[in-house]
Amino acid sequence: MMKRRTLSNGLVYILLSMIGVCILYPILYTFLAVFMTPDEFSQYPPKIVPSELYMGSLHAVLDLIPVGRFIVNSFIVSTLVMAGQVLTGSMAAYAFAFISFKGKAFWFAVFMSTLMIPWEVTMIPNFLLIKSFKWLDSYPGLVVPFLASAFGVFLLRQFFLQLPKELFEAARMDGCGHIRYFLYITLPLSKPALATLSVYVFLNTWNMYLWPLLITNTAQMRTVQIGISMLQFQDSTAWNVVLCGVALVLLPSLLLIMFGLKYLVRGLTAGAVKG
Amino acid sequence: MNLLEREMQYPISQQVPVSLKRKIRSTHVKENILAYVFLAPSLIFFGIFLLYPMMKSIYLSFHLTDPRGRIAAYVGWDNFHTLFVSNAFWKGLWVTGKFAFLTVPAGIVLGLIMAGLAHARLRGIRVFQFIFSLPLAVSVGTSSVIWMMLFHPTMGMFNYFLSLIHIAPVQWLTDPSWSLMSISLMTIWMNSGFNFIVLLSGLQNISEDIYDSAKIDGSGPIRTYIKLIIPLLSPTLFFLFIVSMINSLQSFGQIHILTQGGPAGSTEVLVYSIYKEAFVNYQFGTGSAISIVLFLIILLLTFVQFFVVEKRVHYQ
């Protein structure tokens, strides 16, 4: 029995490793290419591992495009969208969870139905609107359309509803108003859900492709995703220089996943599946 | 039910003095006002950037515009009529469907295998769980660029690996019979992190007792997983299926970077057609008509899934 157990455990490890290699390979390939010289990268048969820690490609990409600027742009945009969605989302979620008001069911239905409108369907009018605001190539154009999301409201409402009811009643008995209850009790108790939403929104905004492609034209305002893919459309650029850029852009999101994964796992499924 | 509602259940009017009644009513009004103050920020943004554009999309789809987006003429159903008689539109719809068919089931099956293996209680399993969730961090922009290199016909690693096992090189992105397949492969990889995380937490919510009792009954691990655990997972699977379907219908970035809809339109999905029509040809009216079709498809899908599939899902 014991022997069979170790045998099947061994099999599980082998399968896990095989899938792990497949999943990891494209990422590993990118980071290995960073340290290859252009010659090393283009020789045949291809080299898998660089022979030395060559830094030239890294310098080349930093000279070629303002990667720093792209990262700062993406960072500003993602942070603002994240802060905005957490603020608007937690306020609306509080109203749906704790305040009794006329038309609650109606407004909740309106909020939920916006989940059914794919963003791509509204992108033409949104583009024309942002253009008429003269917000093309600007931070407001990149940020303002995304400051509210029904997903955030839904996720936080589910969490707020799970907070103990007695707490709310006791606080009301003591004469604690809604605003104080929201700021000093609900929000501090909801840190895990707020963290989930923050990580999710930050990552999504950081990874956004179509919208920044439409509304940014100058290199000054490009976000990382657009900047990097533009690099790839220039034929003259050595390939591993492009991959260097990709690696630089990947680094912040990989770090975020490293620290934020547990919040994502816990929160997303709790909100999504129990809904 | 909150305190106020509970208070309201008592026949207040009979015993409570008028002044208190007024006070309760005024708190009620205050609550209403406060609720709308809390909702206002979200409502304003939804109104401006979602509901108004949605209406505008419908409006635009019945008009022709000049290249700057101003209305040129009312054309009624002409935009839709042109769409429905054009081969390109039906081909785009077909490609979109094929793409969903290639990515969604395979992605979910892969996710089930990964989650099932990574749920085992083994030493070092957290390392694998972390590796399996990594693609979550990789955006559509970066993963397309990486895979573009991997797919390259002469220098790409995939054809090199194939040559090691003596298989002729494949024109991954330039052969019309392969292009959609290649993009699907990349998309499955890109989504595997999300699918894995959703399914793994679904598994973690299933009580350990079920595994133990299955083991006592002499059921092997693979049999237990397929016959017992997967049916219990069906709410999670259902959620994942909807999200993946809608996601796949909205794919754009990988197609824009890897193939630009080609070769010979073999990868031109609906969202790419919208983009091309509106932002390359500057036909905002016909572009909007395609986006309305996309909206109706997604709406229909959501309804079908909620009313038909929902009934068959097994809830614990």
Image (cartoon, helix red, strand yellow):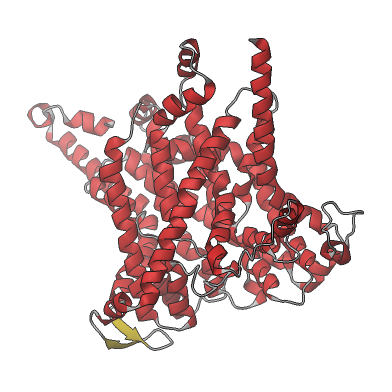
Query: Is A259 above or below relative to B246?
Result: above
- Give the image location of residue A150, x and y in percent: 39, 52
Q: Which is more toward the observer, B79 or A200?
A: B79
The residue positioned 29% from the left and 45% from the top of the image is B306
Residue B26 location, quadrant: top left
Residue A62 location, quadrant: bottom right
Q: Quadrant of the C terminus of chain A?
A: top left
The furthest residue to the left: B14
Query: Is B179 displayed left or right of A162 in the figure?
Result: right
- Give the image location of residue A174, x and y in percent: 37, 28
- Give the image location of residue B107, x and y in percent: 51, 46
Query: Is A259 displayed left or right of A187 in the figure?
Result: right
Query: Is B266 above or below relative to B113?
Result: below
- Give the image location of residue B292, x and y in percent: 32, 68
Q: Which is more toward the observer, B127 or A165?
A: B127
The residue positioned 68% from the left and 18% from the top of the image is A6
Query: Is B158 above or below relative to A226?
Result: above
The residue positioned 17% from the left and 40% from the top of the image is B22
- Answer whether residue B49 is visible to the viewer in this image: no
Q: Quadrant of the N terminus of chain A?
A: top right
- Answer whether residue B307 is visible to the viewer in this image: yes
Marker count (numbered): 0
Q: Which is more toward the observer, B275 or A132?
A: B275
Query: Is B114 above or below relative to A233?
Result: above
The furthest residue to the right: A52
